Amino acid sequence: MSNAIDRGKIEALKSMLLSLHKGESIEELKRKFKDVLETISPVEIPLVEQELVREGVSISEILRLCDLHVELIRDTLRSSLLMDVPKGHPVSLISRENEHIAKLAEALNVYAGALSKASSGEAESHLKAISNILAELRKSRLHYRKIQMLIFPYLERRGITAIPRVLWGREDQVIVKLRELSTLVEKELTHPKEYPNIAEKAMEVSREISDLIFREERILLPAVWILLSEGEWVAIHEAAKDIGYLIPIDVEWASRAKLLLPYEVNGVVTREQVESLPQEFKFAALATLAPDTYEVRSEEDLEFETGFLSKDEVEAIFRHLPIEVTYADVNDRVTFFSQSIFRKGFARTKTIIGRRLGYCHPPRLEHFVKSNVDDLKAGKS
Amino acid sequence: MSNAIDRGKIEALKSMLLSLHKGESIEELKRKFKDVLETISPVEIPLVEQELVREGVSISEILRLCDLHVELIRDTLRSSLLMDVPKGHPVSLISRENEHIAKLAEALNVYAGALSKASSGEAESHLKAISNILAELRKSRLHYRKIQMLIFPYLERRGITAIPRVLWGREDQVIVKLRELSTLVEKELTHPKEYPNIAEKAMEVSREISDLIFREERILLPAVWILLSEGEWVAIHEAAKDIGYLIPIDVEWASRAKLLLPYEVNGVVTREQVESLPQEFKFAALATLAPDTYEVRSEEDLEFETGFLSKDEVEAIFRHLPIEVTYADVNDRVTFFSQSIFRKGFARTKTIIGRRLGYCHPPRLEHFVKSNVDDLKAGKS
């Protein structure tokens, strides 16, 4: 990226700021400055902002540009392939999370720019602002988790594994850098020493976050929107609500399609799908020799709410838990206990199978055991 | 109990001590002092010992009497009903544990007697001896545990529940008192203050232990020897070895009978059995209206190595564990995860079922995960 930004663009943004200051709406501004805005790419905005900082425009003024920036993302960055995504759909919500993250990343960049040339007197307030922004940005783990845990498995099922691994690598790097930066900033707040270094790192991570947003909006989301069936989105939607969103859910999306988990999906990518995919995915999909057809359920498996296990596997899991369990049935009879290879306590013996729970402890503890069992049965504790 | 012991008995024991000192064996002594020994009941020995302490006989001398005491228990206390118990049989081993415990309890009594009239200069060494004996005695939890966890369930199955509860109450009381006494002794060793009080408590717990030995040898063990079938002893034997004995197993007892767990036992007590029972058990067995016929296994239950659970119960147990589990099968595919109502970590989602384990973490951790899985598969860690 070149740092040489056209003077005209800078002046245009400055006068936009003035208009914003006067209370004009983003929509009005977009109409008024249509021509010049069309010449400014979203990636240029951070550079223009740095320039404005350098020229002494106040940070709070510049931060108003963030909203404009997000508008530009919406208009120009977001893929036209996503035009027909309904509101409240996971793709729409993930995209709205990106707008939220984009604003934060941009604010981080603005403060980092100011910090880089701040006097040591000014540095503290910038550091505090950065600290607050980082705390918010670190919540984007929830955003990435939805992509990593809900969306990627459906791509993997289609044999598309490289792109998810690369993206996860970058997402992870951002999260790690945000964590490290937070630590640095907290240290710096108590022992100021090297804030220009912090400014540089903050700008770097801000750039990386923006880059991820670009990849999601232009590549990942359009691709999964094309590839995944409605039933898959039903499953993603349900699980995504468990994980949670960074933004309020505006519209409750619903579908009658039958929920489809990755292991239930026939991972074949059709020729039509390949044709409509963004370029980066086209290569990946074409290179895919075979979808994943692993049968997760074996014949003798028990079907649980959250997966499949044979009886032997259930037993093996109990044997390797760090705790042991004694289970009494609804009639207060011991019907099962587990033995762990990590046991440190007393040995349980099979002679207690069928025993009344009340007889498994000394009389001294009888009342204690009974009142606990009563509480459990009453739904207390 | 009266403290007035016949002078003749005291003198006889004193001369026995002298002979012991000269190296004569217990067998020789028993022959030599046959007449006088027959007049001394095992419960009198502790009283005679107290008397000897009072008369200034050294403690180490008196402790030699313990062996004699145990011999007397073997000859007179042990029920004739146990004559045909084979060596290495659980009843025999539990009985040998009683001899071991009896010696310790008696030594405790001797030192407690000495402590009660010790000068503060002498007290410390007595307290140290008592501390060591208590440490050994507290291991008798293993003895009681075998009775409580292995033998009692078979009585309960026969509808005999009161005697086990009463015995467990006394056993528990002994264990609690031993623990409290240990704490007192440790405190006293650093801040001597009230050792006569300790002496009194030590004599009390020693008496209670001896009383339990009496109840086991005269009542409990003869009764279970009559009531329990060979297959039940096979089960008890196996589990008892897991719990462990306080004494080395002298003979390896084996039986071809099929192992019978309590829930497999038809708990009917026959008229012949009732007739041969010790008096205390006769009442209990006659009063028993009905054996326990609870069917521990329900129709839809899965049979595990250590009990019976329905699929719903397995799921309910996982849901109430304080930890969560993600399970990958032999092909490194996630096939199951558990969700705990106590979860504090991230939400697991069904979209990972069937996923390759290697794709469940960021690339940064891939090597770490792989090397852990490899270690597990190689049986390491």
Image (cartoon, coloured by chain):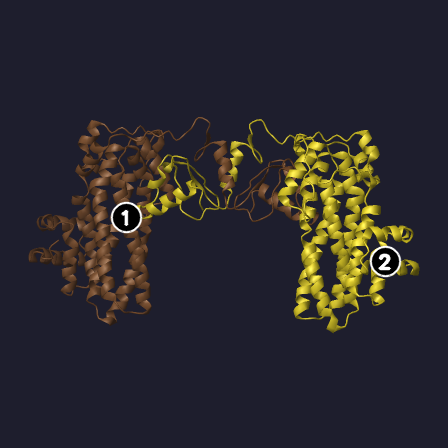
Chain colours: A brown, B yellow
The type of residue carrying mark 1 is Glu
| Residue B89 versus residue A173 in the image, above or below | above
Q: B164 left or right of B16?
A: left
The type of residue carrying mark 2 is Met
Q: Nearer the viewer, residue A277 or A310?
A: A310
Residue B290 visible from this viewpoint? yes
Residue A91 image point, x, y percent: 27, 39
Q: Residue at x 14, y 60 (%)?
A: A51
Residue on which disc 2 sits: B16
* Dot 1 alpha-carbon crowd within 10 angstroms: few under 14, some 14 to 19, many 20 or more: many
* Dot 2 alpha-carbon crowd within 10 angstroms: few under 14, some 14 to 19, many 20 or more: many
Residue A130 image point, x, y percent: 27, 61
- Classify mark 2: helix, strand or loop: helix
State which mark lies toward you, 2 or 1.
2
Tag 1 subunit: A
Among the 4 quarters of the image, the one containing residue A380? top right
Q: B248 left or right of A67?
A: right
Q: Residue at x 32, y 65 (%)?
A: A187
Residue B233 image point, x, y percent: 70, 36
